[in-house]
Image (cartoon, grey):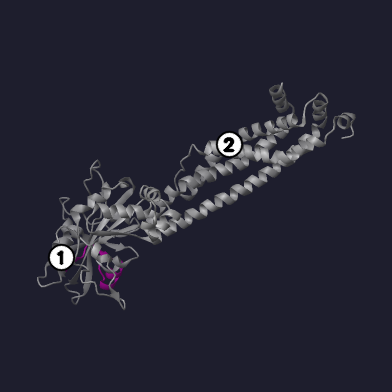
Amino acid sequence: MFFMMLKQSFFRGRRRKVLAAATIVLSASLITALMNISIDVGDKMAREMKSYGANINVVPKSEAIPLEIGGVDYNPLKDRVFINEADLPKIKEIFWHNNIAGFAPFLKTPVTLAGANGKGVNLIGTWFDKQVPIAGDDEFHTGTKVVFPYWQVQGTWPAETGSGNTGDSDILAGAALARELSLKAGDRITVRSAGKEPREERYTIRGILTTGGPEESALVAPLAAVQKLAGRPGQVQSVSVSALTVPEDKLSRKARHSADSLDSAEYDRWYCTAYVSSVSLQIEEAIPNVTSRPIWQVAAGEGAVVGKIQLLMIVVTIAAFIASGLGISSLMVTTIMERAKEIGLMKALGAADWEVYLLFLSESAVVGVVGGLVGCGAGAILSQIIGLSIFGSTVSFSPIVIPVNIAVSVLIALSGSFMPSRLITRLHPAEVLHGRR
């Protein structure tokens, strides 16, 4: 009998049921969209932040020794200890190897330019687009094109050494240096290394490099060419790593302050989460005698943006919950007053107040389920529109959103119906059936 009455109630009051469901659909779609974005925003932001360059810098362990007085670095080992180039593929062999987007080694050496009054500049060697053999991935390419996608070259990129062409003779001139010396693509220059046994090498400028950094006042060439000129075969000074990481939170900040302060459970969770600090530690464990330093400006910026988006989601969800609850409450009051005689008749036939309560709350729950399901579909479409407009790519739909959103929708419907349903106790059969209410 109860389910028959519940079924018949939807045929009699369809208009108000549709309005109530539409109210829930609006809030459910908004909540679904924000939940999808909030869940996926970490990965999206990590990929977006990669356009700002590396978020980890790897240097020899001796470089981490603080020995600076009055702005002058007195570290006796500075620029004398190097990283073995052969160890660099190990960066892609750590626990979070799939999160390593790329890395670029650097070797800097001072040189003088012939024909420019012996002007001294820095010659920087690096990988531009180098294929690195990795276990399980023979097609892995990395270099500055991957790590620093904002680097712009007016001309062509130098060819990597060993590609079978004139890679050793190719070079890029920084934009500031090119303006100062009136250099352009196609010019040939001769550079001389410093030291007791200087070496000379002729290069052809293939392009003018714009980075917004110190590279604009230097010459940039393939790593092998600079190693040859500097007499440092197989050695690099630093490695810039671009890793996909999750935003910083309370646990990662605690580990950043002191990893020893973590208990065993916290340490395991931190180590097995792709925080920039845990990825840095794993790089240190993979390569001997290096220090891996997270670039906290990038990590902190990512965490701040994600935190604000998640806070916005919470605020909007609460606002949608309250607004929808008020709308449902208004519709429920009207419905109860319209069905006063029906309620009075049920009471006259022996129905208890709680049984009438149960009927109306069940109607609200069904409306909540239907509204939640429709809202999930509408919210999924809305999240894709937002993802395409903000990130330029779609947002992945998380299945956990469906049960959570249905539960929230039912809660909205029940909370909006709870207070109006108290009017049922004030309806007396004799009064409503007589027409006094």
| Camera sees residue 27 | yes
Vertical relation: 98 (above or below) 160: above
Q: Secondary structure at mark 1?
A: helix
Q: Which residue is mark 1?
A: 230
Is the residue 120 above or below the residue 88 in the image?
below
> In the image, what residue type sits under mark 2?
Ile
Of circles 2 and 1, the one toward us is 2
Q: Is residue 173 magenta?
A: yes
In front of the other: 176 or 137? 137
Quarter of the image for residue 347 reads top right
* 187 or 379, nearer to the observer: 379
Q: In the rendered view, does 367 fall on the left or right side of 194?
A: right
Q: Which mark is residue 406?
A: 2
Taking 377 as reference, is 192 above or below it?
below
Residue interval drawn in magenta: 172-190
264 with respect to 308 (left or right): left
- Residue at the (26%, 53%) spot, across then down: 285
Near mark 1 (Cα within 10 A), the count class, few <14, some 14-19 or many ≥20, is many
Question: Which quarter of the rendered picture does the C terminus lie within?
Answer: top right
Q: Who's the residue at 31% across and 76% down the image?
A: 71
